[in-house]
Each structure stands twice: as structure tokens, then as C-alpha cells.
Image (cartoon, rainbow, N blue to C red):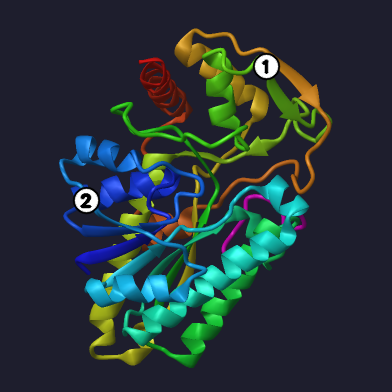
Amino acid sequence: MKNILVTGGMGFIGSHTVIALIEAGFNVIILDNLCNSEITTLKQIEKISGHYPEFYFANLMHKASIEAVFMQQEIHGVIHFAALKAVGESVDKPLSYYQNNLVGTLNLCQVMQEFNVFNLVFSSSATVYGDKNPIPYKEDMPLSATSPYGQSKVMIEQMLQDLHLSEPRWNISLLRYFNPIGAHSSGLLGENPKGIPNNLMPYIAQVATGQRQALGIFGNDYNTPDGTGIRDYIHVMDLANGHLKALAQLASQNSANQTNRNKTSVEAYNLGAGHGYSVLEVVKAFENATGVHIPFKKLARRAGDIAAFYADTHKANKVLDWQVERGLTQMCSDTWRWQLNLSKRANS
């Protein structure tokens, strides 16, 4: 698989994965509608990698736009990030999330099948484990969700399972992300959400630069050691490398498939650090890494959130030969380096 289409490749996780793909020798084609990203990300990718990837401004809701890309490019595999992704927003706008995430994926898979492209790495989520499973979460646990965002991921995973049953040539990795934070070590690429950040680390970074007065911590009465929610935080570049490992596994399955059709599969993998940190622990780690005080205020719980979750990563460790290499301190320092550069560019 040399030519890889990356949907949503201009977003936070997508752009860092594009860097990892280019550095690994892949030819990357990006499809994105820029609903939560900026076109200037292409220049940052070029500065880091020395390569300016091919880019298509397109929306997965428009099937003809996807077909146009496949007609112009010889695609060997797809990494599918493009989706609406905010848990809280999905509670307020469920129809938008179901329409965008489900129909977009359906259109993409139909076009892939039309052009005989059957290798897919899907950006799933730890939210598919719901709030009833014990932690750590394991891939064989029953799936459910506490938000429309999470439910859209559950439904897409089932759709992809059904797709493989109907056409065994499909070879699919379902990567269940936990909480990616951090930034590229160059400081040239990181998370830059539009509007008020939905995720913890970019909000902390904006408080640190004075863009926001204080961090709002949603929930201080959870059944956790300090009352705040616990999450499994993973450096975005470790997550990006997980996609390279998943592609390598698909290539291995394709090789086996040449002699045995039954070797294709749909497999789920947890990508996380394998342990959790509370919100207050992340705040303290950021302060220690940067020397910047982060004022905060405690607020009511946010709809759709749960007290704690973290991953069991043994399957990804063993099958994909994947490990995390960066700790919380580096996640914080890389985030701060990116935020400082972002602020300099905004003020120049």
C-alpha cells in the first residue's frame, strides 16, 4: 500500500498521522472539508516533512466528490478520520452527528467498493465501551454508548463488521482511541480548535497564554481519588504511529490473503497509554512542565461524561507490535511549545 487516502487529514490526529505516513515513505492524499481545521496546516506539514501532500477540499456527504478523488488517484488504502467528534455537542445536536458520521462513512465505503479498494483503518473511539464495562477496557467487551457521538462509532463499527461478512475482501482495523493530547515536537503542528475548546489540553494551553481566564473542570464529585474525571491520555504522535502499525498489519493480512481468502479480517485495537490521569493531575503536570500556573474552577458534570476509563492495550502491543513512547510530561511540554508558536504567529 503506497498511496493512502486520509479523510479528515487536516485535523489534529489526521495531520500528525499524515506526518508519520510521509516519514514512513507513503504517498498521502488528503480529503477534508476544513470544518474544524485550517488550510495553513498543509504548509506546516511541508515544513516538518519536506513534502506538500495532495489535498482535496471535499465533503464525505457528497458522494460524487469522493468518486472524483478515486478517479484521479490510484488509492491502495484509506485512513478514515473525518467525523464530527465533540461528545457534549453531540448530545445537543444528535441528528447532525448521525447524519454526518454515518452517511459520510457509508458514502466512503460505497466508493471504495466501487473502485476495489478494501483496506481501511477506521478512527473509532473509547466511547464505544459505554459506562457499564469495568476498567480497563478490553476489545472483546460489549459495546454501548452514553452520547450520540459514541453511538455513531458503535453503529459504524457494526456496519463495517457487516460489510466484511458480505464481502470478505474487506480488511479493516478499528482503532479505538482514548485521549490524544500533545503536539509535534517541532512546535509547528498541534491542536487548534475553532471556538471554545471541547478538550482538556487545548483549553489548559489557552488559559496558560491568557486567552481564557480559567479552566472549567466539569465534575468534582466523581468516585475518583480527587473527584475529577480520569482519562487515558496518549501523545498524538504515539497515536499516529499506531496507524502505521495498523497499515502494516493490513498489508500482512493482504499477503496472507493471496493464498487464503479467510485471512482478511475486521479487528479492533485499543490505542491508549494503559493507565489514567485525573483532570487535576494533568493540570499539575502542565504546571510542572511549563512553570505556568493554571487557575481553574469546578463546574457541574457535563452531559455524556463518565467518571473514569482507560485502556487495556495488550492486543495492540502484541498483534500490532505497538507501544507508547512518550509520557505525560512530554505531552504537556510539546503542547506548550506548540501553543507558544501559535500565539506568536497570531500576534505577528
The amino acid marked with disc number 2 is: Ile
Classify the position of the C terminus by image quarter: top left
Secondary structure, mark 1, is loop
Placement of 293 over or under 82, stated as above or below: above
The amino acid marked with disc number 1 is: Ala
Residue in the image at 39% along x and 84% along y: 113
Residue in the image at 60% along x and 46% along y: 310
Asked if labels 1 and 2 touch by Cβ distance under 8 angstroms, the answer is no
Secondary structure, mark 2, is helix
**Which residues fall within the magenta stretch?**
131-140
Q: Position of residue 135 (x, y in %)?
A: 67, 50
268 or 147: which is nearer to us?
A: 147
Classify the position of the N terminus by image quarter: bottom left
Say which mark, if any, is on residue 214: 1
Instruction: Write down the quadrant of residue 210 in the picture.
Output: top right
Q: Can see residue 141?
A: no
Locate residue 258 relative to residue 342 in the image: left or right.
left
Placement of 264 over or under 223, stated as above or below: below
Q: Position of residue 66 (x, y in %)?
A: 39, 71
| Distance Cα–Cα, label 2 vs label 1 | 38 Å
Say which mark, if any, is on residue 227: none
Say which mark, if any, is on residue 22: 2
Q: Where is residue 185 in the image (x, y as percent from the top left)?
A: 31, 29
Instruction: Write down the quadrant of residue 121 in the picture.
Output: bottom left
